[in-house]
Image (cartoon, grey):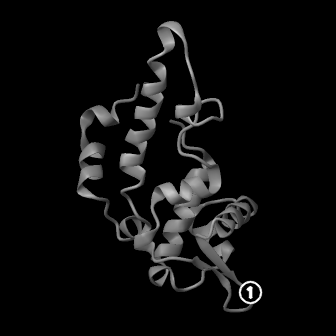
Amino acid sequence: MRITAKADYAVRAAAELAAAAGGERPLKGETIARNQGIPQKFLENILSDMRQAGLVKSQRGVDGGYRLAKAPSEVTVADVIRAVEGPLASVRGEAPEDVEYGGAATPLQDVWIAVRASLRNVVEQVTLADIAGGRIPARVAKLAGDPDARARR
């Protein structure tokens, strides 16, 4: 799986919002951009996508900015990625279960479905509260700590 800059920036921005008084206090876009080293114009587009998905709210004015629309414990990394990128896994733009193969490649559909399930088992388990709190679920930490997981190949 390739994690795009857009998805990475979105999760980092959401973590900043979660850390701001549990997502209750609005943060200016420029503050998020500066804290996370994200180009501000790109961030504004990302925050707009997240607003349309119902993950963030925006508030105008001197005390305005962006804040989470839900509690950080209710928003997963998967929710954020889907808000800015769409489905977690697709094959040529289609859901894995909608792709059909013939001949020797027939079992490949199950491989792509399993890849999506594996990805979900991580990103649907980690919330913004976990990230903002500096911790991730033990199951995910165990996966990340496995030496094979860190092998570049």
| For residue 129, side relative to residue 90 (left or right) | left
Place residue 35 in its image quadrant.
Answer: bottom right
Determine the residue located farthest toward the bottom in the rendered image.
Answer: 62
Badge 1 marks a residue whose secondary structure is loop
Which residue does the image show at 56% across and 77% down from the upper left? Answer: 69
Determine the residue located farthest toward the top in the rendered image.
Answer: 103
Place residue 151 in its image quadrant.
Answer: top left
Q: In the image, what residue type sits under mark 1?
A: Arg
Q: How many marks?
A: 1
Q: Give the x, y percent position of residue 56.
A: 61, 73
Q: Which residue is mark 1?
A: 60
Q: Nearer the viewer, residue 32 or 18?
A: 18
Q: Give the x, y percent position of residue 72.
A: 44, 73
| For residue 92, side relative to residue 88 (left or right) | right
Q: Could you classify mark 1 by the number of other residues whose Cα lies within 10 Å: few (under 14), some (14-19), or many (20 or more)?
A: few
| For residue 71, side relative to residue 50 (left or right) | left
Above or below, 147 relative to 8: above
Q: Nearer the viewer, residue 78 or 101?
A: 101
Above or below, 86 relative to 89: below
Place residue 14 in its image quadrant.
Answer: bottom right
Which residue does the image show at 58% across and 32% down from the upper left? Answer: 98
Which residue does the image show at 32% across and 59% down from the upper left? Answer: 136
Q: Give the x, y percent position of residue 153.
A: 41, 25
Q: Nearer the viewer, residue 55 or 43?
A: 55
Q: Give the x, y percent position of residue 137.
A: 28, 58
Above or below, 9 relative to 103: below
